[in-house]
């Protein structure tokens, strides 16, 4: 199975597969140090065109099924314990609170090509896409509407930055946002979206992690 995530922990590189297998590698030698037990990538499963969110004992929430949300889905994951994102094939992102019935869904619109990366930190969500655009959103504002409003709302982005090519991965770090492109990394200021620096790298970037 392909890697679903990678991160740095001291002298280790930690990878997580799509089946939840976690492996630790020595950063210097590349040798496998340990393989850990399986853990779910996210408590979300596809059931036909529905999304099933598993029960979470830590937050005492029961399993929930959201009907119709799995149609034309590219990927799905969690922003935190209560908010989930659904990246759709039409270049939009849905934000939902699966464990709070009646909370209106919010749509993030702004890309004209497929969303290729999403990262979250605090109230921020960053999306990058094949159109070379990076958008920053304040997801907390998505749920400010009354619960009686059943129609999906649209959230406006905080800022928009145009890059030369698609963003393949993105991560927050302190007051900046790092975006991996096909052959370089760019560091953007979270407050303004302006470019701080650009790092050229050999080869092609598929994904990257955060080394403290």
Image (cartoon, helix red, strand yellow):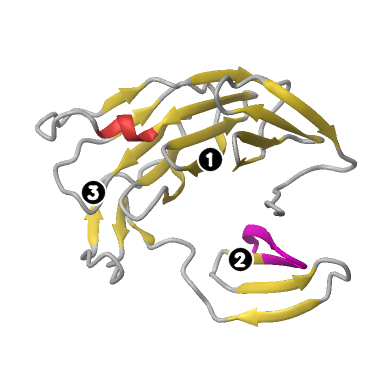
Camera-side residue: 88 or 15?
15
Q: Is residue 143 above or below residue 12?
A: above
Q: Is residue 13 magenta?
A: yes
Q: Is there CB contact under 8 Å for labels 2 and 1?
A: no
Residue ID at (73%, 46%): 206
Q: Quadrant of the N terminus?
A: bottom right
Pointers 2 and 3 in contact (CB under 8 A)? no
N-terminal of the pair, mark 1 or mark 3, is 3
Q: Which residues are magenta?
A: 2-14
Q: Nearer the viewer, residue 39 or 11?
A: 11
Q: Secondary structure at mark 3?
A: loop
Left or right side of 109 for 24: right
Q: Identify the image quadrant of residue 115.
A: top right
Q: Is residue 114 magenta?
A: no
Res. 137 image quadrant? top left
Q: Position of residue 92 (x, y in %)?
A: 43, 30
Q: Tell me the distance, in whole angstroms, between the alpha carbons under discs 2 and 3.
A: 29 Å
x 19%, y 28%: residue: 145
Q: Which residue is mark 2?
A: 16
| Residue 61 picture quarter | bottom left
* Residue at the disc numbered 1: 118
């Amino acid at each position: 199975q392909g890697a679903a995530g990678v991160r740095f922990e001291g002298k280790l590189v930690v990878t997580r597969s799509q089946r939840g297998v976690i492996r630790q590698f020595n950063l210097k030698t590349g040798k496998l140090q340990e393989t850990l037990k399986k853990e779910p990538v996210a408590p979300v499963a596809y059931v036909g065109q529905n999304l099933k969110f598993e029960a979470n004992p830590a937050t005492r929430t029961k399993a929930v099924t959201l009907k119709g949300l799995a149609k034309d889905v590219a990927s799905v994951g969690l922003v935190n314990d209560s908010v989930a994102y659904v990246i759709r094939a039409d270049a939009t992102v849905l934000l939902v609170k699966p464990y709070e019935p009646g909370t209106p869904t919010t749509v993030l619109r702004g890309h004209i090509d497929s969303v290729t990366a999403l990262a979250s930190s605090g109230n921020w969500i960053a999306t990058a896409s094949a159109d070379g655009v990076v958008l920053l959103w304040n997801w907390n504002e998505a749920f400010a509407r009354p619960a009686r409003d059943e129609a999906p709302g649209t959230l406006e982005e905080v800022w928009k930055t145009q890059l030369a090519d698609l963003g393949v991965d993105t991560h927050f770090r302190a007051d900046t946002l790092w975006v991996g492109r096909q052959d370089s990394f760019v560091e953007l200021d979270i407050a303004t979206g302006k470019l701080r620096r650009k790092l050229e790298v050999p080869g092609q970037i598929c994904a990257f992690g955060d080394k403290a």
